[in-house]
Amino acid sequence: MTLAEKILARASGRSRVAPDEIVVADVDLAMSHENADLVRKAFLEIGVPRVWDPEKIVIIFDHRIPAESEKTAATHKAVREFVRQQGIRHFYDVGRGGICHQVLAENGHVQPGMVVVGTDSHTTTHGAFGAFATGIGATEMAGVWVEGRLWFKVPSTLRIEVEGEFAPWVSAKDLILYIIGRLGAAGADYRAVEFDGSAIRRMTIASRMVLCNLSMEMGAKVAFTPVMEIAPDADARYERVLHINLDYDLPEPQIACPHSVDHVRPVSALGEIPVHQAVLGSCTNGRLEDLEIAASILRGRRVHPQTRLIVIPASQRVCLDAMRLGYLETLIEAGAIVNPPGCGPCVGVHQGILAAGEVCISSTNRNFIGRMGSKDSFVYLSSPAVVAASAVAGRIVHPEIVMAKEDAHV
């Protein structure tokens, strides 16, 4: 069996399962953020007095922190009261966590072989820890809060084997953008994706999280990178196996152009594109290694006078570590503004939304029309290195162009 099949077989009490079968699986962990308020309302309508297991529910405020409006403040208040009434111990309030997917990982909530559901589409991130992790709706989550179980159609699996070495300034973000561009936004619809190969196994866990996080942008139900504790069977059957050699297939950074994540071009094909805003952060690329590479590019340089750089650490812990290591000091000295850990402008509600006609280069995960503000703005997705270099140049550039210059402004 594949990894998805093995985990769902265990969770549903079956010896084997096969693609397209419907199973009812026990849920090991149920995560929500501010939309826990929608779940709460649906749960109360069902009429059950207590959640099935308060130890298996995690709630993290991250999308609108600190509260940007009276409406959000009221939502936060209602969820806090519900958490207290139900005895939900794993609650991360403002100032105690950060972005939900980073906080789950940092605090050891996810383990290999678990079934994890979250009311956030990028819950696939936790496949980097060997979990069957997927996003669900608020009403489904209310059912999980009642029974601790959920039905799943067993997904077929795409296997993506990656060999070779990354070129300078090319990273996991470029790899997954390349794959999404090649397969398309619907290329993995309701499939499981297994990443493996020597290049994957050399990656940091943070980089593996990037692959699993963005796999849902090509429709994946779940995604996995290798872990020691659980592996697919040697005779597992795959719907398709894709081979990628970094040496030949990915010679330079990749950019997802407006207004689709699968509208991917190599950076050299873009031409002259000035940027008004650069954003470094999100559940995709707001981790310590992302801030480190940005600091290495911005050290001794200045953000272009016509560009603003917004930096958002993925969690309180990332923020503190980046502070201790001097990364934030370097970024601030270069002209960046550092927002509190959270989702910020990625969801287009506060802390850096775009005006009509503005162009943004961002390390986030979506570039749909209006995603980060005005419907007449333009979002290009890239790696943290390209975001940092473009902030210096004031236009989208390959980092090697900035690093080759001695002047502050390119």
Image (tube, rainbow, N blue to C red):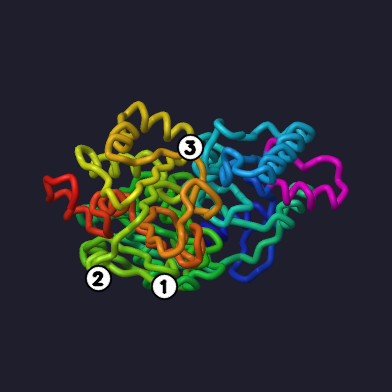
Q: What amino acid is labelled 2 in the image?
A: Ala
Figure quadrant of residue 367: bottom left
The reply to whether residue 153 is in sight is yes
Q: Residue at x 69, y 50 (%)?
A: 26
Q: Is residue 164 left or right of residue 217?
A: left
* Secondary-structure class at tag 2: helix
Q: Position of residue 387 (x, y in %)?
A: 32, 52
Q: Residue at x 61, y 40 (%)?
A: 67
How many marks overall?
A: 3
Q: Which mark is residue 183?
A: 1
Q: Position of residue 103 (x, y in %)?
A: 52, 39
Q: Position of residue 240 (x, y in %)?
A: 44, 72
Q: Nearer the viewer, residue 209 or 393?
A: 393
Give, as a single range, the part of the protein colored magenta.
36-55
* Secondary-structure class at tag 1: helix
Q: Which mark is residue 269?
A: 2
The reply to whether residue 148 is in sight is no
Which residue was labeled with disc 3? 340
Q: Is residue 300 left or right of residue 183?
A: left
